[in-house]
Amino acid sequence: MARTVDPVRHEARRLVIIDAALTVFAERGYDGATTAEICRRAGIGSGTFFHYFPTKLALLLAILALGTAEVRDAAAVYSDRTDPLGVLLDIVRQGADDAADPRMPGFVRAVGGVMHLPEVAAALDADTQAQRDLLLPWVERAQRAGETRTDLTPEQITSWLYLLTDGFLGRTAVEESFTARGEKATLVDTASRFLAP
Amino acid sequence: MARTVDPVRHEARRLVIIDAALTVFAERGYDGATTAEICRRAGIGSGTFFHYFPTKLALLLAILALGTAEVRDAAAVYSDRTDPLGVLLDIVRQGADDAADPRMPGFVRAVGGVMHLPEVAAALDADTQAQRDLLLPWVERAQRAGETRTDLTPEQITSWLYLLTDGFLGRTAVEESFTARGEKATLVDTASRFLAP
DNA sequence: GCATTACTGGAGTCGCTGCTCTAATAATTG
DNA sequence: CAATTATTAGAGCAGCGACTCCAGTAATGC
């Protein structure tokens, strides 16, 4: 036998491609991003590209999976907090911080543009589910503690919190003067107003 | 000479194509929508298509222009109202109603997916500007009347109102159980809470 | 009726892009 | 070092889709 796989090297290379793709997708959209351009950006040949990912779509899905995993991991950070409302606002804050990566809005739009592909829709469903799993228990706790309105179901409140961060992301994508950094405080305030009993 | 153009017939045909395109764009995204499919849906041949629109992109821009014109026309409806806050909430309500067209969310995503094209970006800028022109005077009046918070600039408030309807639209696009009809009341309530002094 | 022009369909073209294939190179094991 | 296999680049292929072209038809003015 000879030469076993070095998983570290392999994974590193994978991440280089993913990072390049994230940039190009954000700049040109999914269809506008050619594999050739991604390869150039990653400093590899097309042979290498397809050695790591079977299709361009698989690459997109890998990026989405990475994001979803991150959301899942985030749960651990809050696990021993005792102030439900505070946790909810911190999660919202975190969403604003994520929007600060200048590639994020463009990437989100790019994904939306190919959401009609069933694989993409499924990946987004998984992501939404992860977000929900993160928020829902804290919403319920906040309601029980009387820190939050109870005229909406926990599911509805979760959706609306998601709506706020999503809309926030979208606005930073479109409007020059609307910056994640500058409007973060208003986002948290708006979430507070929304949650208030 | 012979046969002058019949503008009515011409315009009607144009609208048929536009309507078909709106549907197909919403279903498949911009790049996913082939001109062949749009032609099939509109019941025309490709020759006819390119007789009416020089390129596929021009067709998309025509749809966007139509929407922007609609926003501009909306201004007239509110012109002699005297309750600024009520007008703002009505505009928000109108946004919720627009989101009720089942093709709207998909179409919005499709447009977002090709926003990197300068022509599309410009068209969206124009649309945002029209929305701003509609909202801004009423925000200023509401502030002066003391019906609305004044810790944010009128421009910021306008952006945030836009954010709410935009996010609302996005959520109806993604989440099955989040319907424009069902969540409309919460949208108006959230806008109220946001605007409150 | 006839000349002229608008409109229409659809077959075909041309460029582009995702992906395949091959041959070379590097790494690893014994 | 030899054998084996992972990795790499990049030339080229195959398919697809926007758009062109043209021939035929309908409408209009005289």
Image (cartoon, coloured by chain):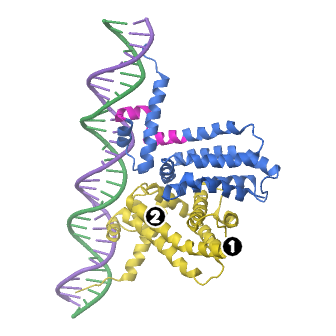
Chain colours: A yellow, B blue, C green, D purple
- Give the number of the disc on residue A147: 1
Q: In this view, does A98 lie above or below B69?
A: below
Coordinates of residue B155 in the picture (x, y in percent): 72, 52
Is D22 above or below relative to A19?
A: above
**Helix, strand or loop for disc 2:** helix
The amino acid marked with disc number 1 is Glu
Q: In the rendered view, tell whether residue D20 sits above or below residue C30.
A: above
Observer-nearest residue: D30 or A109?
A109
Q: In the current view of this chain or complex, which residue is farthest to the right?
A: B145
* Mark 1, secondary structure of its residue: loop
Residue range highlighted in magenta? B43-64
Q: Quadrant of the N terminus of chain A?
A: bottom left
Give neighbour class at mark 2: few <14, some 14-19, many 20+ (Cα, 10 Å).
many
Residue A124's disc number: 2
Q: How crowded is mark 1: few (under 14 residues within 10 Å), some or many (20 or more)?
A: some
Do labels 2 and 1 touch, CB within 8 Å?
A: no
